[in-house]
Amino acid sequence: MSLGRTFLDVRPLRTSPVYRRLLIGRTVSTLGGFMTMVTVMYQVWDTTHSSVWSGAVGLAQALPMVGVGLFAGAWVDRADRRRVYLLATVGQAVCSLLLAVQGFTGHVPVVLVLALVAAQASFGAVGGPAAGVFVPRLLPKDQVAAGLALNQATGQSMMLIGPAVAGVVLGWWGIGVCYLLDALTFGLAFYGAFGLPPLPPEGEKSRPGLNGVLDGLRFLTGHRVVRGALLTDLAATVLAMPVSLFPLVNEERFGGDPRTLGLFLSALAVGGVTATAFSGPVTRLARPGPVMLCASALWGVSLAVFGLTTSAWAGIGTLVLAGAADAVAVLSRTTIVQTRTPDALLGRVTAAEAMVGQAGPHLGNLRAGLVAGWSSGAAALVTGGVMCLLAVTTVAATTPELRGGTGDPEPHPDTGSGPGSEYGPGSEYGPGSQYGPGSPPVGAGEGGGATTAAPAGP
């Protein structure tokens, strides 16, 4: 294999000017998003000095994702995704401008700040599902994984740079300037998406309201490969999320040195960025199912080993490996979801991914904290890693299509609801079928899951 094929596959940047412009706008906007995240946390703490109010920041971001997400996904699957994304971007920019105004004004109630954060998150819950269709619609099939890898690489880079930039701006110019810079970055995001062609759903549009939402949930629970990919993510995040345990393990094993704690947090990001930078062979392999299963298993094993190590440097090394496994699993799983999901359902599936991406890591950190409270940080890490490995093995054993899949989309004659379509009478999801009207409620029996590219955890 040539050295050039080892590094991140940049073919989409050469072959698609539209994608290239979109990626630039997305990258700059992501930088602004991380700046605002840090600034909100700083402002709320500086105003209240209350951990309860600081925790409410996460709630203000997560609740709109859950409350708006699935219905927004159904709307996205009925509309021109480009127009929806542009409207959502304008809404987010207006919220950032209002945050900047209150930042310059000062002495604004914290409740108002959180309300603006929630409003911005609501617009993000609408724009996210719309953006989820861009890569598979703009790039040739053999470049979709490479485009997703580029998205992931730029996002991880901004996650490393954004908080540091926010700290500098806050120290020199204050919170108002930080919010204002974020508002300006949305201008580039808007410009990047403005040149997109119209992107209406391919096939029949989503049914309105709750029926459209239920169609998306039926697909998630009924499609074996997509369901297996999302269950794998849930197994990794809920069973083996390590971040909440870092302070305790640092205290138990390494004397509570804050420098060690900081290295723990950075090691996951370093592993992720490195793996993404060398993702060329993964994206060209075109076998995302086996790659995702192996990477998710490696995530669990690495964290279990981290729980057993007594050397700080050895522990950091295992976390770098875990971060690399995380990045590969996220990339492979996203490739599976976006290539196996019919375009007419992609908005709803992307919304479900984002929802579980909020819930999975939070539940995982809660599980880890409870287990550690009953035993120790090391025991919580080891048991979580082992359970993750067992769960991933179970998904692999029960989903042969995922083990051997090439990532090629299954044939979908139509995604509408008329006779002869995939959701019409006599179809797998139509009336009288396993998932159609009169069937057991969604969620009964075999469950489904969803996922997202969380900062840590496949």
Image: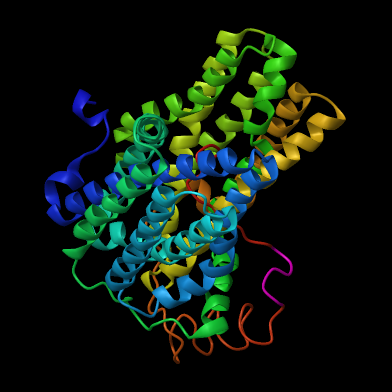
Question: Who's the residue at 43% across and 24% down the image?
Answer: 270
The answer to whether residue 445 is magenta is yes
| Relative to 142, 104 lies left or right | right
* Coloring applied to the structure: rainbow
Q: Is residue 356 visible?
A: no
Please say if 198 is above or below 248: below
* Image coords of residue 75 (percent x, y): 43, 77
Q: Quadrant of residue 390?
A: top right
Q: Is residue 322 visible?
A: yes
Q: Main secondary structure of the magenta part?
A: loop
Question: Who's the residue at 67% across and 73% down the image?
Answer: 442
Q: Where, quadrant-wise, is the N terminus in this rendering? A: top left
Please say if 424 is above or below 20: below
* Image coords of residue 5 (percent x, y): 23, 31
| Relative to 96, 194 lies left or right | left
Please say if 40 is above or below 312: below
| Relative to 97, 434 lies left or right | right
* Image coords of residue 298 (percent x, y): 56, 30
Number of numbered markers: 0
The one of 152 and 39 positioned closer to us in this rendering: 39
Task: Write down the region rendered in magenta.
Answer: 441-446
The answer to whether residue 295 is magenta is no
Question: Who's the residue at 71% across and 33% down the image?
Answer: 384
Question: Who's the residue at 34% across and 37% down the image?
Answer: 153
| Relative to 340, 376 lies left or right | right
* Image coords of residue 239 (percent x, y): 69, 40
Please say if 244 is above or below 405: above
